[in-house]
Amino acid sequence: MSTPPPADHQSWLTPQLTFSHVFGTVALTVIFNTVIALFLDAISVFNISFLVMLVISQCVGLSICIASKVLFFTLTPRWLPLKLLLMTAAILVGTFIGIFLSTLLVGDSLGEDGRYSSPQGQILILGLFFGSIIAYFFISRDRLSHTEMQAQEERLKRETAEKQAAKTELRLLQAQIEPHFLFNTLSTLLSLLETDTSATKQMLEDLIHYLRTSLATSRREVVTLSQEADLIRAYLMLFKVRMGDRLTFDIHLPESLNNTPFAPMLIQPLVENAIKHGLEPKVEGGHVSVTFAKHAGVLRIQVADTGLGLKDNAPKGVGLENIQERLNSLYDDAGRLVLNENAEAGLTVTLEVPCG
């Protein structure tokens, strides 16, 4: 014996009762009813005009449709035997109501030559037959609609989980970069306190500016390129105090891109790698250039340095692998990270993401 499923089991016959769903159901029912009337008129089941047959077909078909919708949306059955029982009841009730309405509307036109003075019995049989076909069609349609809705919900859950994973990766990246950076900066400040108070003051001001900018941007899911460029500038100014004339830099951001939305903590690790692996180990230091450009719906960000370049089997650095993973999470295959050796010296890292 079949037993009812758990209470949390979803019914596949109770889709959302929206205007578009109701309109679509009624429109399809009217089309079915018209086809049935044409079919019955063609085989001459009743000795009545096509117009009368059309009225009867519409009354019966629409009554079955309304009865089934009312029963299912009111009772929302979950147990399969109950679904079938209610559908049978809806077909019977709808057929009787349709016969009653059609009799009121065209009763005088029924059996006008005496052959079918009382065709209600035939209408009942045909109503049950065609009503079952129509009901099966709408059951299958609603079940497919519910399956698609479930698939959409699963897709939304998966996308939400992926976004949450991207947020977690961002937090881990921040936790990895910020302490390392702050410890080195504070160590530099301690060493400067005894030798150069002016440089210490400048570095403290730059650190405060960096922290304020960082707190205002890096905790958000989306920032603007202007905010990101300001953060990078503050970051480079701190290294400028530490490295002195050994570090020069420039940032090229067209004014038209200032308010372009962008995911945070994608550019700073590139700049950090350029300094840590390219310029700091180099005796004479070098130059870092950060360039923003947009072409054909693609935002291209290049971080170029004149440092040591990418040596064979050299580690990529703390941020590059995290950046690649975040690009995959945020943009799937549309985000790219490309490393190219410069002709004279250093490395150029190009980051490309879609941009509306």
Image (spheres, rainbow, N blue to C red):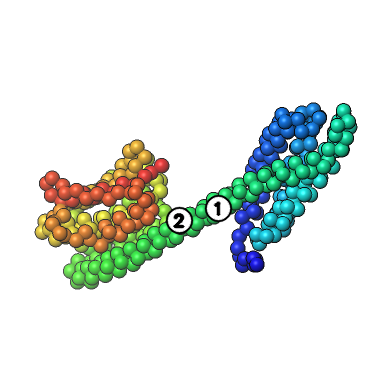
Count of marks overlaid on the render: 2
Q: Of the residues shown, which amino acid type is indicated by label 2?
A: Glu
Which residue is disc 2 drawn over?
159
Q: Residues within 10 Å of mark 1 (few under 14, many from 20)?
A: few
* Foreground residue among 113 and 154: 113
State which quarter of the image contains the C terminus: top left
Which residue is disc 1 drawn over?
147
Instruction: Identify the residue at image location x=68%, y=57%.
Output: 83
Q: Indicate left or right for 128 with 4 as reference.
A: right
Q: Indicate left or right for 188 with 53 as reference.
A: left
* Foreground residue among 16 and 323: 16
Instruction: Identify the residue at image location x=22%, y=50%.
Output: 339
Instruction: Identify the residue at image location x=33%, y=60%.
Output: 210
Asked which secondary structure carries label 1, the reply is helix
Asked which secondary structure carries label 2, the reply is helix
* Disc on the earlier residue, 2 or 1: 1
> Which label was assigned to residue 77?
none
Name of the residue lying farthest toward the front: 115
Residue 284 appears in the rendering: yes
Q: CA distance from mark 2 to mark 1?
A: 18 Å
Instruction: Identify the residue at image location x=30%, y=69%.
Output: 179
Residue 217 x %, y %: 39, 57
Residue 289 x %, y %: 23, 48
Residue 14 x %, y %: 65, 54
Q: Disc 2 vs disc 1: which is toward the camera? A: 1
Residue 246 appears in the rendering: no
State which quarter of the image contains the N terminus: bottom right
Q: Residues within 10 Å of mark 2 (few under 14, many from 20)?
A: few
Residue 249 x %, y %: 22, 51
Q: Of the residues shown, which amino acid type is indicated by label 1?
A: Thr
